[in-house]
Amino acid sequence: MTVQSESTAQGVILTGGAATKVKTLLDQEGRDDLRLRIAVQPGGCSGLRYQLFFDERELDGDIVADFEGVDVVTDKMSAPYLIGATIDFVDTIEKQGFTIDNPNATGSCACGDSFN
């Protein structure tokens, strides 16, 4: 199994606020073997959909980056779609949750769940 480590300029960027939220969620899970995985899958009204989830697996070709003690993992097929994408956590009166700002997305649906 090959695991590569990439610099933030080459892959996904996790903001400090998002790293703090991920750490809180991982503490609640009570497991130290989980990492945040981001993947791109076919689906949604614009063609591609993001998936964010905790994962203990190590897949061949995974790209791993550490952000303030949080490992963010991207599979080799999703990585090209996510170069330079920033994951943040927003907690306002209007919206709460993780957001992804992806410079590679040429368009997205109205709900913001998918992109192309």
Image (cartoon, rainbow, N blue to C red):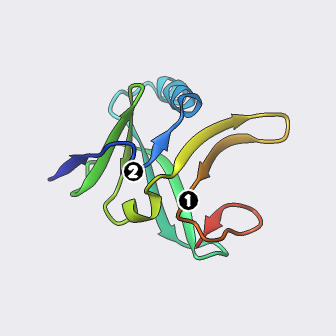
The residue that disc 2 covers is 11
Q: What's under tag 2, amino acid-wise?
A: Gly
Q: Residue furthest left?
A: 1
Seen in the image, is 66 located left or right of residue 109?
left
Q: Please state, as top left, top right, bottom left or bottom right, where the C terminus lies in the image.
A: bottom right
Residue 103 image position (x, y, % from top left): 55, 59
Residue 64 image position (x, y, % from top left): 31, 44
Give the crowd class for mark 1: few <14, some 14-19, many >=20 residues within 10 Å: few
Q: Which mark is residue 16?
A: none
Secondary structure of residue under mark 2: loop
Q: CA distance from mark 1 to mark 2?
A: 12 Å
Identify the mark nearer the N-term, 1 or 2.
2
Seen in the image, is 44 located left or right of residue 8?
right
Q: What's under tag 1, amino acid-wise?
A: Pro
Secondary structure of residue under mark 1: loop
The residue that disc 1 covers is 103
Seen in the image, is 95 located left or right of residue 71?
right
Residue 108 location, quadrant = bottom right
Q: Mark 1 touching mark 2, by CB under 8 A?
A: no
Residue 60 location, quadrant = bottom left
Q: Residue furthest front?
A: 9
Seen in the image, is 84 located left or right of residue 4?
right
Residue pictured at 56% horizontal, 57% vertical:
102
Residue 78 image position (x, y, % from top left): 40, 63
Classify 83 as above or below 67.
below
Residue pictured at 31% horizontal, 61% vertical:
76
Classify 88 as above or below 25.
below
Residue pictured at 54% horizontal, 59% vertical:
50
Residue closer to the observer: 55 or 72:
72
Residue pictured at 57% horizontal, 66% vertical:
105
